Image (cartoon, rainbow, N blue to C red):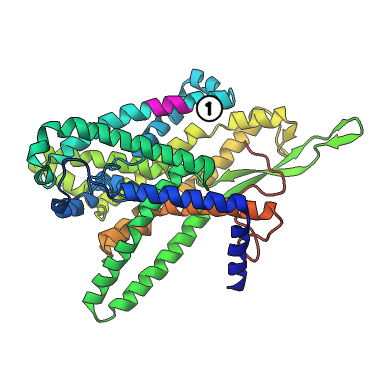
Amino acid sequence: MKKFIQTLKNIWTIDELRSKIIVTLALVFVYRLGTHIVLPGMNPNLLDQAQANAAQNGLLGLFDTFAGGAFSQASILALGIMPYISASIFMQLMTILVPQLQKIQKEGDSGRKKINQWTRYLTVIVTAFQASAYVAYLNSPGYAEAIIPAYQPYFLVSTIITLTAGTLFVMWLGEKIQDKGLGNGTSIIIMVGILARFPQSIIQEFTAKQARGGGGLLIFLIEIAILIVIIMGIIILVQGVRKIPVSYAKQIVGNRQFGGARQFLPMKVNMAGVMPIIFAQAIMFLPTLFSFTGTESGTTIAKIFGDHSNFWYMVVYAVMVIAFTFLYTALIFNPKQMSEDLKRNNGFIPGVKPGQPTADYIGSVMDKITLPGAIFLALVGILPGFAQRLGVTSGFSTFFGGTSLLIMVGVILDTLQQIETQLLMRQYDGLMNSGRIQGRQQTVTQASY
Protein backbone atom coordinates (compact mmCIF):
# COMPACT_ATOMS: atom_id res chain seq x y z
CA MET A 1 0.00 0.00 0.00
CA LYS A 2 2.87 2.35 0.81
CA LYS A 3 4.41 1.60 -2.58
CA PHE A 4 1.09 2.38 -4.30
CA ILE A 5 0.74 5.73 -2.49
CA GLN A 6 4.30 6.63 -3.44
CA THR A 7 3.55 5.79 -7.09
CA LEU A 8 0.52 8.11 -7.01
CA LYS A 9 2.72 10.87 -5.58
CA ASN A 10 5.26 10.31 -8.35
CA ILE A 11 2.52 10.57 -10.97
CA TRP A 12 1.24 13.81 -9.48
CA THR A 13 4.70 15.39 -9.28
CA ILE A 14 5.19 15.13 -13.06
CA ASP A 15 3.71 18.36 -14.42
CA GLU A 16 3.05 17.02 -17.92
CA LEU A 17 1.39 13.84 -16.68
CA ARG A 18 -0.68 15.72 -14.10
CA SER A 19 -1.87 18.13 -16.78
CA LYS A 20 -2.83 15.26 -19.09
CA ILE A 21 -4.83 13.53 -16.35
CA ILE A 22 -6.70 16.72 -15.40
CA VAL A 23 -7.55 17.52 -19.03
CA THR A 24 -8.77 13.96 -19.63
CA LEU A 25 -10.97 13.97 -16.53
CA ALA A 26 -12.42 17.40 -17.40
CA LEU A 27 -13.31 16.39 -20.97
CA VAL A 28 -14.79 13.08 -19.79
CA PHE A 29 -16.93 15.00 -17.28
CA VAL A 30 -18.22 17.26 -20.07
CA TYR A 31 -19.10 14.18 -22.15
CA ARG A 32 -20.93 12.48 -19.28
CA LEU A 33 -22.83 15.70 -18.59
CA GLY A 34 -23.97 15.83 -22.22
CA THR A 35 -25.33 12.26 -22.12
CA HIS A 36 -27.97 13.37 -19.59
CA ILE A 37 -29.33 16.27 -21.69
CA VAL A 38 -32.53 15.13 -23.42
CA LEU A 39 -33.28 16.04 -27.05
CA PRO A 40 -35.43 19.13 -27.66
CA GLY A 41 -39.09 18.21 -27.89
CA MET A 42 -38.87 15.15 -25.59
CA ASN A 43 -40.47 14.85 -22.17
CA PRO A 44 -37.83 13.16 -19.95
CA ASN A 45 -40.47 12.09 -17.40
CA LEU A 46 -42.01 9.65 -19.90
CA LEU A 47 -38.84 7.81 -20.95
CA ASP A 48 -38.31 5.31 -18.11
CA GLN A 49 -40.01 2.24 -19.64
CA ALA A 50 -38.64 2.92 -23.11
CA GLN A 51 -35.11 3.17 -21.68
CA ALA A 52 -35.37 -0.27 -20.08
CA ASN A 53 -36.54 -1.85 -23.36
CA ALA A 54 -33.85 -0.18 -25.49
CA ALA A 55 -30.99 -1.19 -23.18
CA GLN A 56 -31.91 -4.88 -23.62
CA ASN A 57 -32.60 -4.83 -27.35
CA GLY A 58 -29.89 -6.56 -29.44
CA LEU A 59 -27.72 -4.22 -31.44
CA LEU A 60 -29.54 -1.21 -29.98
CA GLY A 61 -28.34 -2.38 -26.58
CA LEU A 62 -24.79 -2.42 -27.97
CA PHE A 63 -25.19 1.16 -29.22
CA ASP A 64 -26.55 2.13 -25.82
CA THR A 65 -23.53 0.54 -24.13
CA PHE A 66 -21.06 2.43 -26.34
CA ALA A 67 -23.01 5.67 -25.81
CA GLY A 68 -23.00 5.27 -22.03
CA GLY A 69 -26.80 5.05 -21.81
CA ALA A 70 -27.35 8.17 -23.92
CA PHE A 71 -29.05 6.16 -26.69
CA SER A 72 -31.88 4.90 -24.46
CA GLN A 73 -32.16 8.30 -22.72
CA ALA A 74 -32.85 10.10 -26.04
CA SER A 75 -29.90 12.38 -25.28
CA ILE A 76 -28.35 14.99 -27.57
CA LEU A 77 -25.32 12.66 -27.61
CA ALA A 78 -27.46 9.57 -28.29
CA LEU A 79 -25.38 8.41 -31.27
CA GLY A 80 -22.16 9.02 -29.35
CA ILE A 81 -18.94 8.12 -31.11
CA MET A 82 -20.41 5.19 -33.10
CA PRO A 83 -20.79 7.04 -36.47
CA TYR A 84 -17.13 8.09 -36.26
CA ILE A 85 -16.11 4.50 -35.47
CA SER A 86 -18.16 3.23 -38.44
CA ALA A 87 -16.54 5.81 -40.74
CA SER A 88 -13.06 4.98 -39.39
CA ILE A 89 -13.58 1.24 -39.93
CA PHE A 90 -14.78 1.87 -43.48
CA MET A 91 -11.80 4.09 -44.28
CA GLN A 92 -9.43 1.55 -42.71
CA LEU A 93 -10.81 -1.22 -44.92
CA MET A 94 -10.66 1.05 -47.98
CA THR A 95 -6.99 1.87 -47.36
CA ILE A 96 -6.33 -1.88 -47.41
CA LEU A 97 -8.43 -2.65 -50.48
CA VAL A 98 -7.87 0.49 -52.63
CA PRO A 99 -4.26 0.94 -53.83
CA GLN A 100 -4.68 4.73 -54.33
CA LEU A 101 -5.66 5.19 -50.68
CA GLN A 102 -2.75 2.97 -49.66
CA LYS A 103 -0.35 5.31 -51.44
CA ILE A 104 -1.91 8.36 -49.76
CA GLN A 105 -1.60 6.72 -46.34
CA LYS A 106 2.10 6.03 -46.95
CA GLU A 107 2.79 9.72 -47.68
CA GLY A 108 3.47 10.26 -44.00
CA ASP A 109 1.86 12.95 -41.90
CA SER A 110 0.23 14.72 -44.84
CA GLY A 111 -1.33 11.46 -46.04
CA ARG A 112 -2.72 10.66 -42.59
CA LYS A 113 -4.21 14.16 -42.37
CA LYS A 114 -6.01 13.63 -45.69
CA ILE A 115 -7.41 10.28 -44.54
CA ASN A 116 -8.51 11.82 -41.22
CA GLN A 117 -10.23 14.70 -43.01
CA TRP A 118 -12.12 12.34 -45.32
CA THR A 119 -13.09 10.27 -42.27
CA ARG A 120 -14.62 13.39 -40.69
CA TYR A 121 -16.62 14.15 -43.83
CA LEU A 122 -17.83 10.56 -43.95
CA THR A 123 -18.76 10.79 -40.25
CA VAL A 124 -21.15 13.66 -41.03
CA ILE A 125 -22.86 11.60 -43.75
CA VAL A 126 -23.10 8.47 -41.58
CA THR A 127 -24.42 10.50 -38.64
CA ALA A 128 -27.13 12.13 -40.78
CA PHE A 129 -28.36 8.69 -41.95
CA GLN A 130 -28.23 7.20 -38.44
CA ALA A 131 -29.97 10.27 -37.01
CA SER A 132 -32.82 9.82 -39.51
CA ALA A 133 -33.17 6.17 -38.47
CA TYR A 134 -33.05 7.21 -34.80
CA VAL A 135 -35.91 9.67 -35.36
CA ALA A 136 -37.97 6.83 -36.83
CA TYR A 137 -37.07 4.75 -33.77
CA LEU A 138 -38.19 7.55 -31.45
CA ASN A 139 -41.57 7.55 -33.21
CA SER A 140 -42.10 3.90 -32.19
CA PRO A 141 -44.32 2.97 -29.22
CA GLY A 142 -42.68 3.91 -25.93
CA TYR A 143 -40.75 6.94 -27.13
CA ALA A 144 -43.53 8.40 -29.30
CA GLU A 145 -45.59 9.20 -26.19
CA ALA A 146 -42.68 11.28 -24.84
CA ILE A 147 -42.58 13.62 -27.87
CA ILE A 148 -44.28 16.91 -27.07
CA PRO A 149 -47.20 17.26 -29.55
CA ALA A 150 -46.63 20.97 -30.17
CA TYR A 151 -43.03 20.27 -31.19
CA GLN A 152 -43.86 17.39 -33.57
CA PRO A 153 -43.63 19.41 -36.86
CA TYR A 154 -40.06 20.48 -36.07
CA PHE A 155 -38.89 17.26 -34.41
CA LEU A 156 -37.37 15.55 -37.47
CA VAL A 157 -35.16 18.43 -38.65
CA SER A 158 -34.11 19.63 -35.20
CA THR A 159 -33.23 16.10 -34.02
CA ILE A 160 -31.09 15.33 -37.08
CA ILE A 161 -29.20 18.62 -36.69
CA THR A 162 -28.80 18.15 -32.92
CA LEU A 163 -27.59 14.54 -33.15
CA THR A 164 -25.13 15.37 -35.95
CA ALA A 165 -23.73 18.28 -33.93
CA GLY A 166 -23.58 16.03 -30.85
CA THR A 167 -21.56 13.33 -32.62
CA LEU A 168 -19.16 15.91 -34.05
CA PHE A 169 -18.76 17.36 -30.55
CA VAL A 170 -17.96 13.91 -29.11
CA MET A 171 -15.49 13.35 -31.96
CA TRP A 172 -13.87 16.69 -31.09
CA LEU A 173 -13.66 15.68 -27.42
CA GLY A 174 -11.95 12.44 -28.43
CA GLU A 175 -9.40 14.31 -30.55
CA LYS A 176 -8.69 16.75 -27.71
CA ILE A 177 -8.14 13.87 -25.29
CA GLN A 178 -5.80 12.33 -27.87
CA ASP A 179 -3.82 15.59 -28.29
CA LYS A 180 -3.77 17.05 -24.78
CA GLY A 181 -4.95 14.22 -22.54
CA LEU A 182 -3.97 10.66 -21.71
CA GLY A 183 -4.64 7.67 -23.94
CA ASN A 184 -6.67 7.21 -27.10
CA GLY A 185 -9.55 9.69 -26.95
CA THR A 186 -12.12 7.60 -28.82
CA SER A 187 -11.34 4.49 -26.75
CA ILE A 188 -11.47 6.48 -23.50
CA ILE A 189 -14.94 7.82 -24.36
CA ILE A 190 -16.23 4.31 -25.16
CA MET A 191 -14.71 2.88 -21.99
CA VAL A 192 -16.24 5.61 -19.83
CA GLY A 193 -19.64 4.92 -21.39
CA ILE A 194 -19.32 1.22 -20.58
CA LEU A 195 -18.06 1.80 -17.04
CA ALA A 196 -20.90 4.26 -16.37
CA ARG A 197 -23.32 1.32 -16.43
CA PHE A 198 -21.23 -0.92 -14.16
CA PRO A 199 -22.28 0.47 -10.71
CA GLN A 200 -25.98 0.24 -11.56
CA SER A 201 -25.58 -3.27 -12.97
CA ILE A 202 -23.68 -4.60 -9.96
CA ILE A 203 -26.25 -3.05 -7.57
CA GLN A 204 -29.08 -4.72 -9.50
CA GLU A 205 -27.26 -8.06 -9.37
CA PHE A 206 -26.60 -7.72 -5.63
CA THR A 207 -30.23 -6.81 -4.98
CA ALA A 208 -31.47 -9.74 -7.04
CA LYS A 209 -29.26 -12.21 -5.17
CA GLN A 210 -30.21 -10.75 -1.79
CA ALA A 211 -33.89 -11.15 -2.64
CA ARG A 212 -33.34 -14.85 -3.29
CA GLY A 213 -32.00 -15.44 0.21
CA GLY A 214 -30.50 -18.80 1.17
CA GLY A 215 -26.92 -18.28 0.03
CA GLY A 216 -27.61 -15.45 -2.41
CA LEU A 217 -24.70 -13.41 -1.03
CA LEU A 218 -22.32 -16.37 -1.47
CA ILE A 219 -23.45 -16.77 -5.11
CA PHE A 220 -22.83 -13.06 -5.67
CA LEU A 221 -19.28 -13.34 -4.29
CA ILE A 222 -18.63 -16.39 -6.50
CA GLU A 223 -19.79 -14.36 -9.52
CA ILE A 224 -17.37 -11.58 -8.64
CA ALA A 225 -14.52 -14.11 -8.32
CA ILE A 226 -15.41 -15.62 -11.72
CA LEU A 227 -15.49 -12.13 -13.24
CA ILE A 228 -11.96 -11.47 -11.93
CA VAL A 229 -10.72 -14.75 -13.45
CA ILE A 230 -12.31 -13.84 -16.80
CA ILE A 231 -10.63 -10.43 -16.71
CA MET A 232 -7.27 -12.12 -16.08
CA GLY A 233 -7.88 -14.40 -19.06
CA ILE A 234 -8.74 -11.45 -21.31
CA ILE A 235 -5.55 -9.68 -20.21
CA ILE A 236 -3.62 -12.74 -21.39
CA LEU A 237 -5.52 -12.66 -24.69
CA VAL A 238 -4.89 -8.94 -25.24
CA GLN A 239 -1.21 -9.06 -24.23
CA GLY A 240 -0.31 -12.46 -25.69
CA VAL A 241 2.39 -12.39 -28.39
CA ARG A 242 4.47 -14.95 -30.28
CA LYS A 243 8.05 -13.69 -30.59
CA ILE A 244 9.82 -14.54 -33.84
CA PRO A 245 13.61 -14.08 -33.49
CA VAL A 246 15.14 -11.62 -35.99
CA SER A 247 18.83 -10.91 -36.62
CA TYR A 248 20.30 -7.90 -38.39
CA ALA A 249 23.48 -8.00 -40.47
CA LYS A 250 26.46 -6.00 -39.16
CA GLN A 251 27.32 -2.78 -40.96
CA ILE A 252 30.47 -0.73 -40.37
CA VAL A 253 30.19 2.98 -41.18
CA GLY A 254 33.46 4.80 -40.43
CA ASN A 255 34.55 3.67 -37.00
CA ARG A 256 31.05 2.71 -35.85
CA GLN A 257 29.27 -0.62 -36.10
CA PHE A 258 25.55 -0.84 -36.69
CA GLY A 259 23.28 -3.89 -36.56
CA GLY A 260 24.29 -7.34 -35.48
CA ALA A 261 21.71 -7.30 -32.68
CA ARG A 262 19.34 -10.20 -31.96
CA GLN A 263 15.81 -8.87 -31.69
CA PHE A 264 12.33 -10.27 -32.18
CA LEU A 265 9.19 -9.70 -34.19
CA PRO A 266 6.14 -9.64 -31.87
CA MET A 267 3.07 -11.37 -33.37
CA LYS A 268 -0.13 -10.71 -31.42
CA VAL A 269 -2.32 -13.70 -30.66
CA ASN A 270 -5.39 -11.51 -31.08
CA MET A 271 -4.35 -9.39 -34.05
CA ALA A 272 -7.97 -8.51 -34.95
CA GLY A 273 -8.79 -7.02 -31.53
CA VAL A 274 -12.47 -6.47 -30.82
CA MET A 275 -13.52 -6.04 -34.47
CA PRO A 276 -14.69 -9.67 -35.07
CA ILE A 277 -17.12 -9.41 -32.15
CA ILE A 278 -18.49 -6.08 -33.40
CA PHE A 279 -18.94 -7.46 -36.95
CA ALA A 280 -20.58 -10.63 -35.66
CA GLN A 281 -22.98 -8.71 -33.44
CA ALA A 282 -23.98 -6.47 -36.34
CA ILE A 283 -24.66 -9.46 -38.62
CA MET A 284 -26.52 -11.36 -35.89
CA PHE A 285 -28.88 -8.39 -35.52
CA LEU A 286 -30.13 -8.72 -39.12
CA PRO A 287 -32.30 -11.86 -38.54
CA THR A 288 -34.32 -9.89 -35.96
CA LEU A 289 -35.69 -7.87 -38.89
CA PHE A 290 -37.80 -10.93 -39.79
CA SER A 291 -40.10 -9.91 -36.94
CA PHE A 292 -41.46 -7.17 -39.20
CA THR A 293 -42.76 -9.77 -41.71
CA GLY A 294 -45.58 -10.65 -39.33
CA THR A 295 -45.27 -14.39 -40.08
CA GLU A 296 -44.95 -17.03 -37.38
CA SER A 297 -41.62 -18.34 -38.74
CA GLY A 298 -40.26 -14.78 -38.93
CA THR A 299 -41.23 -14.17 -35.31
CA THR A 300 -39.54 -17.43 -34.25
CA ILE A 301 -36.29 -16.52 -36.06
CA ALA A 302 -36.32 -13.04 -34.53
CA LYS A 303 -36.90 -14.54 -31.08
CA ILE A 304 -33.93 -16.91 -31.43
CA PHE A 305 -31.49 -14.26 -32.67
CA GLY A 306 -32.77 -11.62 -30.26
CA ASP A 307 -31.94 -13.77 -27.22
CA HIS A 308 -28.21 -13.76 -26.39
CA SER A 309 -28.64 -16.77 -24.11
CA ASN A 310 -30.25 -18.97 -26.78
CA PHE A 311 -28.17 -22.06 -27.58
CA TRP A 312 -28.37 -21.70 -31.38
CA TYR A 313 -27.62 -18.00 -31.15
CA MET A 314 -24.41 -18.72 -29.24
CA VAL A 315 -23.34 -21.48 -31.68
CA VAL A 316 -23.85 -19.32 -34.78
CA TYR A 317 -22.32 -16.32 -33.04
CA ALA A 318 -19.17 -18.25 -32.03
CA VAL A 319 -18.68 -19.57 -35.58
CA MET A 320 -19.06 -16.06 -37.00
CA VAL A 321 -16.54 -14.61 -34.53
CA ILE A 322 -13.96 -17.24 -35.53
CA ALA A 323 -14.61 -16.62 -39.24
CA PHE A 324 -14.39 -12.83 -38.88
CA THR A 325 -11.19 -13.16 -36.84
CA PHE A 326 -9.46 -14.95 -39.72
CA LEU A 327 -10.98 -12.57 -42.30
CA TYR A 328 -10.03 -9.36 -40.49
CA THR A 329 -6.56 -10.66 -39.64
CA ALA A 330 -6.02 -11.47 -43.34
CA LEU A 331 -7.09 -7.92 -44.25
CA ILE A 332 -4.84 -6.05 -41.83
CA PHE A 333 -1.88 -8.43 -41.68
CA ASN A 334 0.51 -8.49 -44.67
CA PRO A 335 3.38 -10.99 -44.21
CA LYS A 336 4.83 -10.07 -47.62
CA GLN A 337 5.17 -6.43 -46.60
CA MET A 338 6.82 -7.47 -43.32
CA SER A 339 9.26 -9.67 -45.25
CA GLU A 340 10.16 -6.79 -47.58
CA ASP A 341 10.66 -4.43 -44.62
CA LEU A 342 12.98 -6.94 -42.96
CA LYS A 343 14.99 -7.36 -46.15
CA ARG A 344 15.22 -3.60 -46.65
CA ASN A 345 16.64 -3.20 -43.13
CA ASN A 346 19.12 -6.09 -43.57
CA GLY A 347 17.13 -8.25 -41.21
CA PHE A 348 16.44 -11.97 -41.48
CA ILE A 349 14.88 -14.79 -39.51
CA PRO A 350 17.54 -17.39 -38.58
CA GLY A 351 17.16 -20.52 -40.68
CA VAL A 352 14.72 -18.93 -43.14
CA LYS A 353 15.70 -17.53 -46.54
CA PRO A 354 14.83 -13.85 -47.21
CA GLY A 355 12.00 -12.95 -49.56
CA GLN A 356 9.00 -15.23 -50.17
CA PRO A 357 10.15 -18.01 -47.77
CA THR A 358 10.21 -15.44 -44.96
CA ALA A 359 6.70 -14.23 -45.90
CA ASP A 360 5.45 -17.84 -45.95
CA TYR A 361 7.04 -18.55 -42.56
CA ILE A 362 5.53 -15.43 -40.96
CA GLY A 363 2.14 -16.26 -42.50
CA SER A 364 2.24 -19.83 -41.19
CA VAL A 365 3.12 -18.65 -37.67
CA MET A 366 0.25 -16.16 -37.74
CA ASP A 367 -2.20 -18.86 -38.90
CA LYS A 368 -1.12 -21.15 -36.04
CA ILE A 369 -1.60 -18.52 -33.32
CA THR A 370 -4.78 -17.03 -34.86
CA LEU A 371 -6.79 -20.25 -34.43
CA PRO A 372 -6.49 -20.49 -30.61
CA GLY A 373 -6.88 -16.72 -30.39
CA ALA A 374 -10.09 -16.90 -32.47
CA ILE A 375 -11.51 -19.73 -30.34
CA PHE A 376 -10.73 -17.84 -27.14
CA LEU A 377 -12.27 -14.67 -28.61
CA ALA A 378 -15.42 -16.61 -29.55
CA LEU A 379 -15.60 -17.97 -26.01
CA VAL A 380 -15.31 -14.44 -24.63
CA GLY A 381 -18.10 -13.35 -26.98
CA ILE A 382 -20.61 -15.96 -25.78
CA LEU A 383 -19.74 -15.79 -22.07
CA PRO A 384 -22.48 -13.17 -21.37
CA GLY A 385 -25.05 -15.63 -22.78
CA PHE A 386 -23.78 -18.40 -20.49
CA ALA A 387 -23.85 -16.01 -17.52
CA GLN A 388 -27.45 -15.07 -18.29
CA ARG A 389 -28.46 -18.75 -18.54
CA LEU A 390 -26.91 -19.33 -15.11
CA GLY A 391 -29.10 -16.68 -13.50
CA VAL A 392 -27.02 -13.50 -13.78
CA THR A 393 -29.12 -10.41 -14.52
CA SER A 394 -28.98 -9.23 -18.14
CA GLY A 395 -27.24 -5.95 -17.30
CA PHE A 396 -24.46 -7.49 -15.21
CA SER A 397 -24.00 -10.44 -17.58
CA THR A 398 -22.65 -8.10 -20.31
CA PHE A 399 -19.56 -7.51 -18.15
CA PHE A 400 -18.66 -11.21 -18.19
CA GLY A 401 -17.28 -10.95 -21.71
CA GLY A 402 -18.13 -9.63 -25.14
CA THR A 403 -17.29 -6.23 -26.54
CA SER A 404 -17.68 -4.35 -23.27
CA LEU A 405 -15.07 -6.27 -21.27
CA LEU A 406 -12.59 -6.48 -24.16
CA ILE A 407 -12.69 -2.74 -24.72
CA MET A 408 -12.40 -1.94 -21.02
CA VAL A 409 -9.42 -4.23 -20.48
CA GLY A 410 -7.66 -3.04 -23.65
CA VAL A 411 -8.12 0.68 -22.94
CA ILE A 412 -7.14 0.41 -19.27
CA LEU A 413 -3.98 -1.54 -20.14
CA ASP A 414 -3.04 0.97 -22.84
CA THR A 415 -3.55 3.90 -20.46
CA LEU A 416 -1.50 2.22 -17.71
CA GLN A 417 1.27 1.53 -20.22
CA GLN A 418 1.44 5.23 -21.12
CA ILE A 419 1.58 6.23 -17.44
CA GLU A 420 4.34 3.69 -16.75
CA THR A 421 6.32 4.95 -19.74
CA GLN A 422 6.13 8.51 -18.39
CA LEU A 423 7.33 7.32 -14.96
CA LEU A 424 10.25 5.29 -16.32
CA MET A 425 11.36 8.16 -18.58
CA ARG A 426 11.79 10.30 -15.47
CA GLN A 427 13.73 7.66 -13.51
CA TYR A 428 10.78 6.62 -11.35
CA ASP A 429 9.76 3.03 -10.66
CA GLY A 430 6.97 1.56 -12.76
CA LEU A 431 3.42 0.95 -11.59
CA MET A 432 4.27 -2.47 -10.16
CA ASN A 433 6.94 -3.72 -7.76
CA SER A 434 8.28 -6.26 -10.24
CA GLY A 435 8.02 -6.76 -13.95
CA ARG A 436 6.52 -4.41 -16.47
CA ILE A 437 3.18 -4.04 -18.17
CA GLN A 438 3.77 -5.85 -21.42
CA GLY A 439 2.81 -4.32 -24.72
CA ARG A 440 4.35 -0.89 -24.26
CA GLN A 441 7.60 0.15 -25.91
CA GLN A 442 10.48 -1.10 -23.82
CA THR A 443 14.02 0.15 -23.61
CA VAL A 444 15.26 -2.75 -25.76
CA THR A 445 14.73 -1.90 -29.40
CA GLN A 446 12.12 -4.10 -31.06
CA ALA A 447 11.33 -4.63 -34.71
CA SER A 448 7.92 -3.09 -35.32
CA TYR A 449 6.25 -3.75 -38.63
Whole-percent x and y of residue 151? 12, 37
For mark 1, give the secondary structure. Answer: helix
| Amino acid type of the residue that numbered disc 1 sits on in the rendered structure | Arg
Whole-percent x and y of residue 99? 50, 19
Residue 272 visible to an observer of this rendering: no
Whole-percent x and y of residue 287? 21, 40
Q: Which residue is mark 1?
A: 112
306 within the magenta span: no
Task: Find the residue positioned furthest to the right.
Answer: 255
The residue depicted at 71 percent of the width and 56 percent of the height is: 427
Asked where in the image residue 123 lies, by quadrant, the reply is: top left
* Span highlighted in magenta in the image: 116-121
The residue depicted at 47 percent of the width and 56 percent of the height is: 234
**Above or below, 144 relative to 420:** above
**Above or below, 247 relative to 216:** above
**Above or below, 318 relative to 135:** below
Could you tell whether 169 is left or right of 352 in the image?
left
The residue depicted at 41 percent of the width and 49 percent of the height is: 28
Could you tell whether 384 is left or right of 134 in the image?
right
120 within the magenta span: yes
Asked where in the image residue 396 lies, by quadrant, the reply is: bottom left
Residue 234 visible to an observer of this rendering: yes
Q: Residues within 10 Å of mark 1 (few under 14, many from 20)?
A: some
- In-front residue for pair 19/105: 19
Task: Find the residue positioned furthest to the bottom.
Answer: 214
What secondary structure characterizes most of the magenta part?
helix
